[in-house]
Image: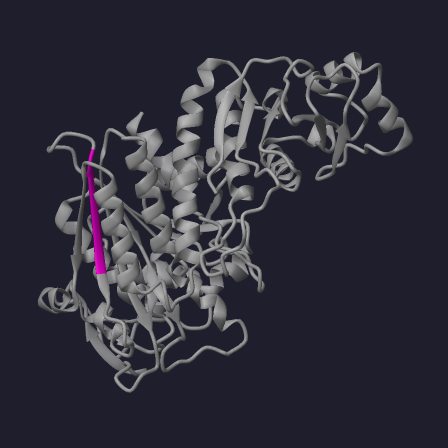
Amino acid sequence: MTIQFSLSKQSPESAAVPCIVVGVFEEGLLTAAAARIDEKSAGAIKRLIVSGDVSGKLGSTNVLFAVTGVAAARVLVVGLGEQKKFDAARFKRTCGDAARALKSLPLDSAVSYLTEVEVSGADTAWKVRAAAVATDAQVYKYTATFKPREQSRTPEFVALAFAAADTAAAALTEAAAIAAGVRFARELGNLPPNICSPAYIAEQAQKLAADHPGVACEILEEADMRKLGMGALLGVSQGSAFAPKLIVLQWRGATEADKPYALVGKGITFDTGGISIKPSAGMEEMKFDMCGGAGVLGAFLAAVKLKLKLNLVCVVPAAENMPGSKAQRPSDVVTTMSGQTVEVLNTDAEGRLILCDALTFVQKYNPQIIIDAATLTGACVVALGKHATGLMSKDDALANDLLAAGETALDRAWRLPLWDDYQSQLDTGYADIANIGGKYGGAITAGCFLSRFTEGFRWAHLDIAGTAWEEGRKGSATGRPVAMLVQYLLDRAN
C-alpha cells in the first residue's frame, strides 16, 4: 500500500476528516494545534491531562472521539516527551508513532498538525519531508509471500495531509521519491533468497529502466565477467547454482561532459559464509546481505523520480555465496579485474571480493565520486551498534558531505579511521593482498582492502551491516542508506 500525502491549510477545529493529529508535551504543555482544540472543546485535553489519561510521554498516543466543537471525528493526541529534549530525531519518532496509531484505526485519511511543532534548526519544508518519510516507513507492510487475504471492509489508511503552506510542496515531492526508493530497497531486502536471486535483482533493474525514460540498463553475465578478468567476483559465485549478474544502471540528468556520481552496492543474495560456513543460528538473516545493492538501487530510483540534474551510474554485483562442490576454498588465490591478486583466507569475507571488481569496473565511467554501500562486517556492528552506519574515506570533504547528508535525512553515519597504519594487516606471503586483516579492527581493514581498488578516485565506503535491517524473526529491512544517499545527491544537484 502506498500512502498519498498532501498539504492542508484548514484550522484544527474545522478539518472535517476522520482524524486530526496534535501533540502534547510531557509537562502538560500544549502545542498550538492542541491548544486550539482544547479551547474549542472547553478544556477537553487539559481535563485528560489532569486526570492522567493523557501523559504527553514520548511514544504515547490517545484517541479522543466526538470532541465537542471539533469537526473531525477523532483527535489523536501524540506524546512529544520533554519540550527541552524535543529535537529532529524525536520529531521523526513522534511522526512514526502517530502513523502507527493511525493505521490501527478504522479510517482512510487524516490531517497532521505535528508539522507546526517547533524543531530546532528545522524549517517547515524539512518537517513535512521528514514526517512523510517517517509515516511511509511505518505504513509499509511486507505481503509478497503471504497467502492473499480477502478484502477487508474496514477503511484502509491511505491519505495523510500535513498542516503547511503551499511553499512546502517541493518537500512532499522529495518525500515521495525518497519513500519510493526506501520501499524499493526494503522490498528487495525482505524477499526470500529463493525468489530474490541475482537474476531477480537484474530483472527489477531492467523493469526500473523500462518504467523511467532516460534510464539505461546493462546486465553483464558470467561470460562477460570472465572476459573482464573479474576473478574475485566469479570466485565468490562459483559454489552457487545461481549465476552472478553485474547490474549497471545509468541516468543522464546533466550534460555529456559532466562526470557521473557512482553508487556501488554489495548484492550477496544469500551468504552462508561459503566453506568458512557461518553458525546456523541467525543464518536466515543472511538474505539481507544484498541490502547494500538494494540501497543503491533505491537511491538511484529516487534520484530518477526527482529528475536530478546530474549524471549517475549505479553498479550492483549480485551473487550468492554457497559451499557447493565448486566453491572456492580458504587459501585460494584469485586475480581481480585490477590485476591485483588476493589470497582468500576466509570465504565469509566475500563482500569485499565482489565489490573490488565492481569498484574497478565502475572506473571506466570516470566518475567524480564513488560511494559504495555494503553489509560488510560484523565488526562494524560491534563498534557502532544498530544506529549508525560506518563511514570510511580518505577524502575529508566527501566524508563531511555524507555525514551532513545523514544528519539532514536522519540516516546518520559515524566516521571510522582509514589510516595506512592498518594496511599492513592485509599482508600475506602468497598474494598481493589477503581478504581479511586479522582479529582487530575488522571493519577498518575491510575498508582498507577496498581502498586498494579505488586509488586516484574520490571514494567513500558505507558499512551498513548494523543499520540495513532489524534483527529477529519479524525483523525487516530498513531501506538505509537510501535517505542519506538521496540527500547527498540532492545537495550536489542543488
Outermost residue, left side: 227
Name the quadrant containing residue 46: top right
Q: What range is drawn magenta here?
A: 246-252
Front one among 187 and 69: 69
Query: Does residue 341 appear to the left or right of 421 in the view shown?
Result: left
* Residue 403 drawn above or below residue 422: above
Tell me which residue sits at (21%, 75%) in the image: 334
Name the quadrant containing residue 212: top left
Residue 417 in sight in this render: no
* Residue 445 at x, y percent in the picture: 38, 63
Name the quadrant containing residue 42: top right
* Residue 134 drawn above or below residue 162: below
Query: Does residue 324 appear to the left or right of 357 in the view shown?
Result: right
Tell me which residue sits at (29%, 63%) in the image: 198
Outermost residue, bottom side: 325
Q: Main secondary structure of the magenta part?
A: strand
Tell me which residue sits at (28%, 79%) in the image: 239
* Residue 242 at x, y percent in the picture: 27, 72
Q: Is residue 435 magenta?
A: no
Residue 457 in sight in this render: yes
* Residue 117 at x, y percent in the picture: 63, 22
